[in-house]
Image (spheres, coloured by chain):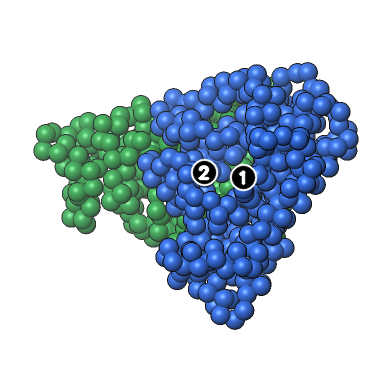
Chain colours: A blue, B green
Amino acid sequence: MTATVHPLNRDTPPSLNPIMSLVAQDMNAVNSIILDRMQSEIPLIPELAGHLIAGGGKRMRPMLTLASAKLLDYPGTRHHKLAAAVEFIHTATLLHDDVVDGSDMRRGKTAANLIFGNPATVLVGDFLFSRSFELMVEDGSLKVLRILSNASAVIAEGEVDQLTAQRRIETDEERYLSIIGAKTAALFAAACRISAVVAERDEATELALDSYGRNLGIAFQLIDDAIDYTSDSETMGKGVGDDFREGKVTLPIILSYARGNAEERKFWEDAIAGHRSSDEDLAYAIRLMRENGAVDDTIERARLYGQRAIDAIAGFHAADAKAAMTETVAFAISRAY
Amino acid sequence: MTATVHPLNRDTPPSLNPIMSLVAQDMNAVNSIILDRMQSEIPLIPELAGHLIAGGGKRMRPMLTLASAKLLDYPGTRHHKLAAAVEFIHTATLLHDDVVDGSDMRRGKTAANLIFGNPATVLVGDFLFSRSFELMVEDGSLKVLRILSNASAVIAEGEVDQLTAQRRIETDEERYLSIIGAKTAALFAAACRISAVVAERDEATELALDSYGRNLGIAFQLIDDAIDYTSDSETMGKGVGDDFREGKVTLPIILSYARGNAEERKFWEDAIAGHRSSDEDLAYAIRLMRENGAVDDTIERARLYGQRAIDAIAGFHAADAKAAMTETVAFAISRAY
């Protein structure tokens, strides 16, 4: 790990503590808005939404909106409502993802679709998505509305693209990066960028924050992909090998397939086709990846995107915010160790 | 049928022809926008969206936006994009409804979920929903964005409310009217109202058009409910008795249950619980409804809402538009005969 990604000489591993302290007060306000605006006269709506929202999660995206505002020394509170809108968009996509993937677990709890059923899960997702636009309209910035409606369309496109790529071993690295750029990184980028809009800063500032968020988002996703082949279920809130068992084509698989000999390629083809999902198969997959370096190189690529995120905010001066946002990148990468 | 609902003395039954002729040219422009904006680099998106959109449907909601603009002598074209946005919201909710209901058929064709699967159907719905907001943002009216984001949240609430009421025989008329007011009538109301916004007319005009759309929407839904117990499958694009077999509590059932003796109530309870779905059960249900007047009175209520819709636009002067919008109400009601 380079000195830049680990900006501080110290013994403690990088964490989200700096960014959490940076935005703690703002986050209280955002949490109040989230709790207030997920209410409805239809009791099932706050019950189902609350199951996921109260279930925690790092509130990573609203945290980035708040930290970006700090980086720009924005003195106002308009971004609170918008950070809540970003979290609602994210929550809506998680609910729909759980239906799409037939998830069993989410954030260490039983997934909403298993408790409340697919119909309610789809519809409460729709409600939160609509509510997020209501929040944006209340704020009144057409530029923010443009950024977030575009991000939402791109996320949906990325999800459909991923669905099309599902169980297709021929998915290559470019295609995969385009999928996670849409499905994961677009909302990270938008979450950061909208703070430049409310702070009324120039286009270059918007683009710098967009770049920070986008590259951080890709780094996060690539590390998630790597962790699925390294960690144990305790540290993730989901089981190791989930991606493998579901036949998900992620970067470790793409690299392994590209690097494999005929016999190994056959194994990866079978795995992605759903014929290799035993514990022994998973152990063999992990061993192959250790030999061919696919997990290490996935982490290496994540580190590269992380470095780009850090460089994107190099020109800003708010020291605390910049340090916290830099350490957030280091934290994202460090999860692989 | 009163002279007001049948405004013309003639032998031909009321039809959508007048409103279709009124807006034909505008509708070509709207259809181009719909076809253009459902495109995506991900081929599955236009394929799935096209299956439903090309499958026809009356384009009732965008037609109402266009007719309302004619009623106000609005000379511009801004409403074309917004009419497309309204149709995208409607299409997104249909796709999600098909997943929620596990539909087999839609618009006389195999439902998208059966051809493309639930995951793609949910996600393409999300895409169209996001795209609708992009279209609104391009138009740039925050007032329109407020009206349509609110309508979207209300629709989702109505759908969840209906889900909660599913298979609950104790659902009463008030609750049911509140559900269809949210789930169906809110988008009819918004579709009409936004034309008053683009034409820059006063609040009273907005409210009049909102009321026309809302009451027409309720009338449409109540007639749909009645038809399920009267028509044959040819005229609907779906089978008669679908609501009954699915245990859907609609107004004909609510009235029948309220009016039934102990034995009949037991039958309705069993039916809604899912234990009465044979052809004989359906025939018995229809016979009971004929005796207790539930279908006739559902139609009677629809006629009342239709009359309110007509009265709501009584003060406007554009003769062609007013006649066409009046006949649209008459058409909605006449479907029951």
The amino acid type of the residue labelled 1 equals: Arg
- In terms of image quadrants, where is residue A160? bottom right
Q: Are marks 2 and 1 in contact (CB under 8 Å)?
A: yes
- In terms of image quadrants, where is residue B170? top left
Which mark sits nearer the N-terminus, 2 or 1?
2
In this view of the protein, which residue sits in the foreground, B271 or A219?
A219
Residue A184: image location, x then y, percent? 65, 47
Query: In the rendered image, is residue A20 in sight?
Result: yes
Q: Which mark is residue A2?
A: none
Query: What chain does badge 2 belong to?
Result: A
Query: What chain does badge 1 belong to?
Result: A
Q: How many marks?
A: 2
Instruction: Return the residue at label 2.
Output: A235
Instruction: Return the residue at label 1.
Output: A335
Report the residue at 61% width, 68% height from top.
A291
Left or right side of B107 for A60: right
